[in-house]
Image (cartoon, rainbow, N blue to C red):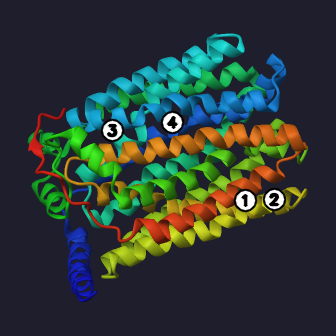
Amino acid sequence: MAVHEVADAESSSAQAQAGQAARVAGGRTRWGIAALLGTGILINYFDRVNISVAGTDLQHAMGLSAGQLGILFSAFTWSYGLAQIPVGLLLDRIGVAWVTRVSTVLWACATFLTAVVSGLGMILLARLLLGLAEAPAIVSSQKTTSYWFPRQERGLCTSAFDGAAKFSNVIGVPLMSVVVSEFGWRGAFWVSGSLSLLYALAYWLLYRNPRQMLRAGRLSQSEYRYITEGGAQDEDAVPANQFAGLGRLLRNRKVWGLSLGFACYNYAFFMLLTWLPGYLEGQLHMSVLKGGLYSAIPWITATLSDLLIGGLLVDRLIARGRDANRVRKSVLVGGMVVGLCVIGGATTHTPAVAVLFISLGLGGLSASAPVGSSCVALIAPEGSVGAVGGILNFLSQLFVAAAPIVTGYLVDDTGNFAWGFVIATLMVALGILCYLFVLGRIEQVPSLQPAQKGTTA
C-alpha cells in the first residue's frame, strides 16, 4: 500500500509537470492526427448507421422478420470480430499506415457492393466483407494514439475518435434518413461509400508516423520531444515473439477485466445503435424522418459527454496533479452506473420520456467509453497495443453480434422492445462489476521480453 502511495505521489507530480509542458509544447501536429482519426471513425460508423436507418425499408422490400433483420444487422460484426486479433498482430508487426490505407479502400468498395446487390444472401455477403475491411479501424486508432500522444493526453485524443462514433449518429442518422426518404435504402450506401473513398484518399496523403513527420519537417523537434518524453510508445517496436506474448496477455487478469467491461458497454451501445430507429418507428409510431430527428438527441448527448467528460475533464484533472488511476477509474465506473438509465426505454410509451432516459444512459456510457478505449494503450506492453486492442475488440464483437439478434428475436416474441432494454441494462451492470473487481489498477502490463526494433510502415 505504501509503495502505491509513493508511486501515486510521484505520478501526480509528473502529471502536473506534464500539464505545464503541454502549454509550452511547440506545435499542434498531434491534434491534426487526432482530427484525422476522428474523421475516419465518423465515416466508418456511417457504414453502421446506414443499415439501421435503411432497415425498415429494407425489411419491407425483402419481406424480412425482425429476427432476420437482426441477423443482417449483426452480420458485419461476425467477420469484424473474427478479424480483430489477427489484425491487431498485423498492426503490431508492420504498423498502422499501410494496414489502414488498404483497409479503407476495401471498406469503400464493400459499401458500394451493398448498394448494387439484391437478395438477402448477397447483402449478407456484402456486410461480411465490410466487417473484414473495417476490422483495423478502432485498433489502428488506439495504436496511433500510443505513437502520437503522451499518456496524460490520451483521454481527449481517444475521445476524438470514440466521440466520432457517437457523433456519426447525430449527423449520420438524419442525413441517412433524408437520403432513404428521397432515394430509397440503396441511396444510403452510395452516399456512405463515396465518403469512405474520399477519406481513403485523405489518409493516404496525410498520415505518417511521428518520426517520419519529423524527418519531413512536418513535426517540430519540441513537439516530438514532448510526445516521446510523455510516455508515447516507440513506433518501431515489435514484440520479439508475438504468439508467446499473445498467450501471456490472454492469461492476464487486467486484460480480461478491461475487455469484459468494455464488451458489456458495447452490448448496450450497439443495441441502441442498431435498434433505436426501429424502436422509435415501431414502438413509438414515428415516421422514418421524425424518428431520425429524435434519434439525434441521445447521440448529441453522447457526443458531448464523450468529449467533455471522458476526454477533456479526465485529461484536465490528471494534468492538475490528480491521481491518474483514481480519475480514470472513477469516470470508467461512474459513467457505467449512469448508463443503467437505459432501462427507462422499457418502461414508457411516451417519446419525450423515452428519449430522456436513453439520453441519460447513453451520456453515461459515452463518458466511460473513451477511458476504457484509452486503457488499451495504457496497459499494453511496449509494442503490443495491437494485440491488446485485438483481444478487447474481439470479445466486444461477440457481445455486439449478440445485441441486435437477441433484441430482434425478443421483439418478435413479445411485440415490443422492453426485454431488449432490460438485457442491455443487465449487461451494463455486469460491466461495472468487471471494472471494479477484475481490472484492478490501470497500469502497464510488464513485457514478456523486450520488444525488438522493427520496420513498421
Camera-nearest residue between 280 and 399? 399
Residue wearing tag 4: 43
What separation in Å lies between label 3 and label 4 (alpha carbons)?
A: 21 Å
Q: Amino acid at mark 4?
A: Ile
What separation in Å lies between label 1 and label 3 (alpha carbons)?
A: 33 Å
* Identity of the residue drawn at 51% across and 41% down: 42
Q: Secondary structure at mark 1?
A: helix
Q: Secondary structure at mark 2?
A: helix
Residue wearing tag 1: 358
**Residues under numbered marks 1 and 2 in contact, where contact means CB atoms less than 8 Å apart:** yes
Report crowding for label 4: few under 14, some 14 to 19, many 20 or more residues within 10 A (C-alpha).
Answer: many
Horizontal arrangement in the rendering, residue 300 relative to residue 240 (left or right): right
- Label whose residue precedes the other's in the sequence (3 or 4): 4
Horizontal arrangement in the rendering, residue 64 relative to residue 423 (left or right): right
Residue wearing tag 3: 88
- Label whose residue precedes the other's in the sequence (3 or 2): 3
